Image (cartoon, helix red, strand yellow):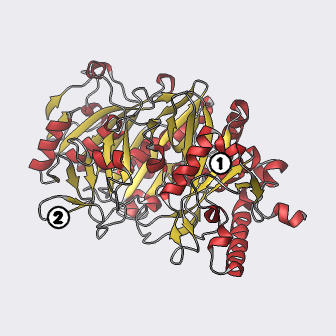
């Protein structure tokens, strides 16, 4: 086996059963990975220097094909209602078959870090079949100094072989696509999909398993910090605005997707961003748009015109077009990935029913209720098979990545909110003036104005009304924002239709939360929508 690049002399891939590969390229930098990806026909160059790659049939995560090994250690620690089990025996066969599949192939290795806080960092080795996947994950995770690579000993190993096809009968999986996580031994196997996001979300899943036992809250969120150290956390699923809204030129970006909250404050899990690019424009999102014109950025499933210029308005392949770039491509990004304890928490939702107001103040109990509920809409293209938004409840605003029971994360969050006296807001970036298909998407200018008022503390000074359906506090008027938009019912042409829709959504919340009621106290149960109305 030919070996190239820089690595720990005592930790080659032969040690993990990959010694029969034709060649391995360790920790190649951007220019070399570009050359390899283009030479192999994996990707092509755009006029501005970005690398465009297509992922084939899988243009989003294959959530139904993700499994966790159920062994003696994980049996009573994993939330099996939400995580699909795989037996240790099936995993062992899958592992050996993937090692055999790698024989005679050229492989790429990146030694990277998940977690900017040294006390909670997860040293991760990612072995990929594609050069562009190696560049992608290099952009997304934290890149150690070159001199540190010679002593690098991974705690997690990801083997990513898109050309491998799983056998459901032999491997205990569902289809030819598989993402299998052995949390006990720190191994993730990815086969049958070229969608690069599976790698980064696998690291997130492992951190979500490891950190709570250390008293650290893992969060599916973006985060930024103001000039006075006033950090803010933005919870939300893909497509709700985490990346867009945290990219604020007046605030330092900590990260756009995954963070931890421990005794020293918050810290980014990653060293890059994975931003949606569908209908991306320089006017609406100048910082993100600028990254698409940089050498080193990976454009995923973005359509190019005859001159290879990206057309961000073309969703013919998928609505889930993306760009992956290192965090320092954002001009005001944090160099450390670390910030103080947050003063503000924003819970983002894309309400497909058009019922929720654009912003609402939450009590600590309401915050835990809405965190455990995780209401939003699955946005087109984020997952395979989703072609238009549909209402969903994804607990902790990240159920697909949460191995443990939601109340473990919820109790951690509630304790941290109380200890640090954090203000919590629910922000709807979804629809106004009607449900999806009738109403319009919430204007981003209004959302930004309301967020700014919340982050500066101005929103706490305005007059509030109590929402008749959800019981939270909603601003009556905010400078620079159309007053009508603050009252969702008034934006509907038919108020009676709004009431019916609101009643339907309240019922969905209550039905969904039934599974958590036995795990929370009375104050959290009383934060349910409709409770206040019923009491009257």
Residue occupying image coordinates x 24% and y 59%: 54
Looking at the rendering, in which quadrant would you find the C terminus?
bottom right
Closest to the observer: 280 or 374? 280
Q: Which residue is mark 1?
A: 425
Give the SS element for disc 2.
Answer: loop
Q: Is residue 456 left or right of residue 277?
A: right
Closest to the observer: 181 or 304? 304
258 is higher (above) or lower (below) than 239: above
Q: Is residue 183 visible?
A: no
Mark drawn on residue 440: none
Looking at the rendering, in which quadrant would you find the N terminus?
top left
Residue occupying image coordinates x 73% and y 35%: 418
Residue occupying image coordinates x 61% and y 33%: 213
Q: Residue furthest left?
A: 39
Examine the image and state in which quarter residue 428 appears: bottom right
173 is higher (above) or lower (below) than 268: below
Examine the image and state in which quarter residue 265 appears: top right
- The image shows residue 247 at horizontal and vertical percentages of 43, 43
- The image shows residue 527 at horizontal and vertical percentages of 78, 54
Q: Which residue is mark 2?
A: 305
**Label 2 to label 1, Cα distance in Å?**
42 Å
Closest to the observer: 393 or 494? 494
- The image shows residue 309 at horizontal and vertical percentages of 18, 58
Q: Is residue 35 left or right of residue 401?
A: left
Give the SS element for disc 1.
Answer: strand
Examine the image and state in which quarter residue 487 appears: bottom right
């Amino acid at each position: 086996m030919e070996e190239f690049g820089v690595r720990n002399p005592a930790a080659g891939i032969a040690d993990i059963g990959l010694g029969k590969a034709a060649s391995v390229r360790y920790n190649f930098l951007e220019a070399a990975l570009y050359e390899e990806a283009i030479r192999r026909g994996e990707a092509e160059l755009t006029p501005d220097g970005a690398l465009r790659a297509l992922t084939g049939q899988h243009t989003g995560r294959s959530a139904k094909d993700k499994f966790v090994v159920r062994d003696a250690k994980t049996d009573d620690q994993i939330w099996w209602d939400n995580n699909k089990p795989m037996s240790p025996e099936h995993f062992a066969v899958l592992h050996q078959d993937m090692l055999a599949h790698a024989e005679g192939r050229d492989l790429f290795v990146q030694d990277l870090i998940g977690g900017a806080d040294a006390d909670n960092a997860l040293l991760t080795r990612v072995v990929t079949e594609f050069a562009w996947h190696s560049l992608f994950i290099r952009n997304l995770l934290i890149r150690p100094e070159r001199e540190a690579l010679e002593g690098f000993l991974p705690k997690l190993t990801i083997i990513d072989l898109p050309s491998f096809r799983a056998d459901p009968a032999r491997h205990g999986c569902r289809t030819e696509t598989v993402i299998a996580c052995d949390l006990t031994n720190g191994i993730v196997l990815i086969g049958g999909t070229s969608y690069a996001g599976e790698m980064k979300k696998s690291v997130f899943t492992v951190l979500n398993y490891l950190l709570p036992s250390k008293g650290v809250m893992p969060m599916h969120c973006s985060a930024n910090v103001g000039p006075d150290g006033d950090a803010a956390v933005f919870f939300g699923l893909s497509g709700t605005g985490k990346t867009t809204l945290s990219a604020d030129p007046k605030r330092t970006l900590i990260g756009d997707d995954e963070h931890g909250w421990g005794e020293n404050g918050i810290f980014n899990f990653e060293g890059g961003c994975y931003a949606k690019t569908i209908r991306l424009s320089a006017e609406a999102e100048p910082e993100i748009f600028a990254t698409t014109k940089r050498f080193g950025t990976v454009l995923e499933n973005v359509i190019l015109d005859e001159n290879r210029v990206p057309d961000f308005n073309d969703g013919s392949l998928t609505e889930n077009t993306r760009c992956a770039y290192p965090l320092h491509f954002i001009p005001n990004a944090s160099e450390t990935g670390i910030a103080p304890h947050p003063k503000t928490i924003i819970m983002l939702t894309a309400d497909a029913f058009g019922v929720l107001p654009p912003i609402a103040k939450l009590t600590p109990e309401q915050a835990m209720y809405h965190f455990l509920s995780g209401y939003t809409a699955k946005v087109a293209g984020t997952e395979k098979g989703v072609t238009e938004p549909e209402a969903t409840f994804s607990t902790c605003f990240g159920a697909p990545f949460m191995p443990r029971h939601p109340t473990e994360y919820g109790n951690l969050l509630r304790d941290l909110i109380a200890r640090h006296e954090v203000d919590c807001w629910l922000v709807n970036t979804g629809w106004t003036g009607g449900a999806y298909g009738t109403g319009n998407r919430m204007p981003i200018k209004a959302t930004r104005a309301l967020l700014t008022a919340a982050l500066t503390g101005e929103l706490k000074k305005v007059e509030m009304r109590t929402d008749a359906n959800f019981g939270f506090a909603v601003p009556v008027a905010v400078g620079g924002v159309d007053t009508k938009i603050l009252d969702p019912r008034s934006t509907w042409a038919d108020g009676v239709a709004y009431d019916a829709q609101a009643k339907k959504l309240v019922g969905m919340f209550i039905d969904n939360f039934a599974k958590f009621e036995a795990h929370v106290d009375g104050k959290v149960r009383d934060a349910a929508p409709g409770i206040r109305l019923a009491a009257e």
